[in-house]
Amino acid sequence: MKRYLIVPALAIIWTSGCSTTPYQGAEKTVKSMDATRQEAALASKMVSETIGSLTAIVSTPQEDLRPAYEQFNKQVRDIESQARKTKMQADWMRGNRDKYIDAWTSELTAIQNPAIQKDSAKRRTETLINFNQVEKSMNAARVAYEPFISDLNDIKTTLSTDLTAAGVSSTKGAVKNARANAISLQKSIDSVIRELDKVTAKLSPSS
């Protein structure tokens, strides 16, 4: 049975009437973080692919721009969908995280040994700090996403009505911004992944 090293005393004092034990709460939290990490990694990959499609439109002379535009248009829709999916996954992760921390806080009062209680409280605080770092990095990624998707939609809208060499040329400024914003977004996503890895490592049995 998979176990997570949190607070051994909590597993001992947890009453049999509870539907979820602290170990199970940790397991749910780690699973939701792993799933959020996977969605974030996929989002980063999609950002690269979308910029690649955009580059194909503006950098490669083509007699017919429609195939390249249609691919770009699809990827913009996909990345918007992925952003929504990642947000839903992150919300699920937050719910599991909050339940886990609340359970830990509640059970601290049942620990009789002052030294064990102090150590457990310290580790709870450290874990909460790590969770807050994850939240901070996710907020930064959300902020970085907005100008990126705004540029993509401006380019998509412009080309939908003027899919010509002149129309493509008119988007050069927005394309430059989109590339720069893509770099910022991917750095933010990388930060999210790093912070998630830190927390899951500390909640694993070997930590």
Image (tube, rainbow, N blue to C red):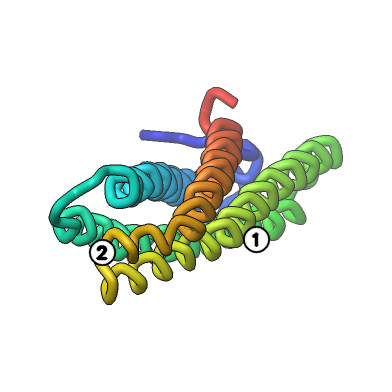
- Residues at marks 2 and 1, CA–CA distance in whole angstroms: 58 Å
Name the spot of residue 28 as percent of width and height, x first: 45, 50
Does residue 96 appear to the left or right of 199 in the view shown? left
Is residue 24 at least partly visible in the picture? no
Name the image quarter holding the N terminus: top left
- What type is the residue that disc 1 sits on? Asp
Of 107 and 62, nearer the camera is 62
Where is residue 130 drawn, in percent x and y?
68, 44
Query: Residue type at mark 2?
Result: Thr
Q: Residue furthest bottom?
A: 161
Q: On the picture, is 114 further left or further right than 149? A: right
Give left or right: position of 195 versus 165.
right
Above or below 82: residue 113: above
Q: Which residue position is annotated with label 1?
A: 102
Displayed quadrant of residue 81: bottom left
Camera-side mark, 2 or 1: 2
**Residue 207 locus on image (x, y percent):** 60, 26
56 or 124: which is nearer to us? 56
Q: Residue at x 59, y 41 (%)?
A: 191
Identify the disc placed on residue 173.
none
Question: How many labels were placed on the picture?
Answer: 2
Q: Which residue is mark 2?
A: 164
